[in-house]
Image (tube, rainbow, N blue to C red):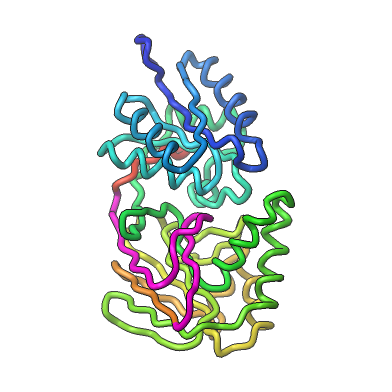
Amino acid sequence: MSGTSSPDVVAVLNPISGGGVARARWAAVAKELARREVTARVEESESGAQARRLAEEAAASGALTVAVGGDGQIREVAAGVLRVPGAPMGIVTAGRGNDMARHLRLPDDPAAVAEVLCDGLRRDLDVLTIGDEIAVGNVYMGLDSVATELINRLRWMGPLAYRLAPAVAALRWKPADFRIEVDGAVFSGPVHMVVVANSGWYGSGLHMVPSAAADNGRIDVLAVDGARNKLRLISAMGEAKTGAHVARAEVLTFSGQEITVSADRPVPVHADGDYLQELPVTVGIRKAVLPVLVPR
């Protein structure tokens, strides 16, 4: 691609993503890039702030900036790339859930990944805004954010944590009284969880908000009515692999441009697998600002 000493591609890699598989994943992709005479450099990030700085520097240099890791690493790298308007971004999946990659239908095979990085289609994604922070996939609160905190404590279990933690969290959970405001319209009452979606996929393969798409120019919201018992909630989550749960009476859906959520007790707010803050929270949208390479 480039005949200069500057690399064509700079990978910003989280070395602990996916239990430590990120280095091996990138090495396989880098080998395929080298076969295509594409020069690449890898930078390992030890924190979210460092990932953002490295991504911004890579984007400013004119290189294709590639996030290597899970959904959290994608969010951090995207935050850095967005500081260079119009700069493109690539993704190499190496996390536990890889839900953003699932939404974008990114390949797993190293040769196919390299092909996307070299000749992929540019898809201009929306990002969600939470104050000065962003989310590329989803912002969520309630039972699911409590479960995510448990998942993060059970990293050593790998994918099994995504199935065990929600069940354990559900046994302990009591619904909070939420107030959800969507473009001025208000819903209030007991709620188990709220998902403010850009991609709609999370929890390692749950199609939680099927109406969501990361480039549809709107925010899609799903809430689960807390007046229904937890057995119905668990049953609904069993249907979330296919998105069939949205037909249930206890599943409420909304869409808009600005969402404000509050509750009658402290509830953690997570974005793409990472803790952000406690409620209340206001989520907005920046439309078509993040160019990401996807398969043709």
For the N terminus, give its image quadrant: top left
Residue 241 at x, y percent in the picture: 62, 64
The residue drawn where x is 63% and y is 71% is 237
Side of 287 where 244 appears, left or right: right
Q: Is residue 277 magenta?
A: yes
Q: Is residue 82 magenta?
A: no
Residue 53's quadrant in the figure?
top left
Q: Nearer the viewer, residue 239 or 186?
A: 186
The residue drawn where x is 30% and y is 82% is 185
Q: In the figure, 186 relative to 119: above or below?
A: below
Residue 165's quadrant in the figure?
bottom right
Residue 9's quadrant in the figure?
top left
Side of 161 where 227 appears, left or right: left
Residue 77 at x, y percent in the picture: 42, 40
Q: How many marks?
A: 0
The residue drawn where x is 48% and y is 73% is 194
For the C terminus, give its image quadrant: top left
Q: In the figure, 23 relative to 130: above or below?
A: above
Q: In the figure, 161 relative to 22: above or below?
A: below
The residue drawn where x is 40% and y is 67% is 220
Q: Which residues are magenta?
A: 264-288
Q: Nearer the viewer, residue 209 or 39?
A: 39
Q: In the figure, 199 relative to 296: above or below?
A: below
